[in-house]
Image (spheres, grey):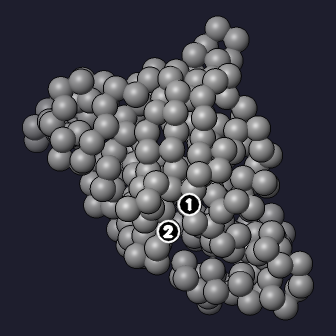
Amino acid sequence: MAEALVIKGLSKRFGGLRAVQDVSFTVQENETVALIGPNGAGKTTSFHLITGFHRPDSGSVLAFGHEVVGLKPHDVCALGMARTFQVAKPFGAMTVLANVMTGAFLRDRHIAAAQKKAREAIEFVGLGAKEQTPAKDLTTIDQRRLEMARALATQPRILLLDEVMAGLNPAEIDQAVALVKKLSASGLTIVIVEHVMRAIMAVARHIVVLDHGQKIAEGAPKEIVENPEVIRAYLGSYVHPPAPGDAHA
């Protein structure tokens, strides 16, 4: 299996804060890797560094063998790496179709071709019936779907998903898990940041754990949930849920 994404020694400091420190991991082609850890661990900052929104102080990011450090976000996207954002910010007054076409225009400036690609992405994520709906009128889960569709319309090979299940109810989380699995089955390489551990356990082949900007563990899901350091730093309530009637539950 080929290496899709290779992160080596990634570091970033904001003033006196070490947001990310010497983080390294590799994502194989068509693999789904989860990046987990407590709030403030450096997960989203890592996404910003990987996709060109921040420049690292040191380190390397190789996407299919191409160094992307120093490239602008749109150039990183043109190389085949797209992302969603923790807070969905669609063009509210524009329709779902128009929103997704903004992504499709990366590869094709012809309106008919961009519209075709956008419709394919919209259908893939399950928003086909709402392509003429203004984005501001979508539910939370449909805004997440729209974020994914806009990223898919850029025709990525690597897709970074930043907390796409935040704010969803259990039934919606199940729908989101099914969609991530569908994305993986289509051949995409996926890196996902998520706090919903049952979702991570369902979709990830490999997990990287950050705490205070540093990698503290990585491995298969079963190894991670049994790792004492990960349990201490992050997974305590997931691995050892409170007993029924516990006053602190």
Residue lying at the far right of the rendered structure: 110
At label 1, the amino acid type is Ile
Kindly identify the residue that appears in the image at 50 percent across and 23 percent down. Answer: 22
Kindly identify the residue that appears in the image at 81 percent across and 88 percent down. Answer: 113
**Residue 116 at x, y = what percent?**
74, 90
Which residue carries the number 1 mark? 158
> Label 2's element?
loop
Is residue 133 shown to the viewer in this render? no
User: For the residue carrying disc 2, how many other residues have a C-alpha within 10 Å: few (<14), some (14-19), or many (20+)?
Assistant: many
> Label 1's element?
strand
* Above or below: residue 223 compared with residue 17: below
**Residue 9 at x, y = what percent?**
52, 27
User: For the residue carrying disc 1, how many other residues have a C-alpha within 10 Å: few (<14), some (14-19), or many (20+)?
Assistant: many
**Residue 50 at x, y = what percent?**
62, 42
Which residue carries the number 2 mark? 188
State which quarter of the image contains the N terminus.
bottom left
Q: Return the disc, 1 or 2, that comes first in the chain's sequence.
A: 1
* Above or below: residue 208 compared with residue 161: above
Kindly identify the residue that appears in the image at 70 percent across and 11 percent down. Answer: 15
Q: Nearer the viewer, residue 212 or 208?
A: 208
Q: CA distance from mark 1 to mark 2?
A: 6 Å
At label 2, the amino acid type is Leu
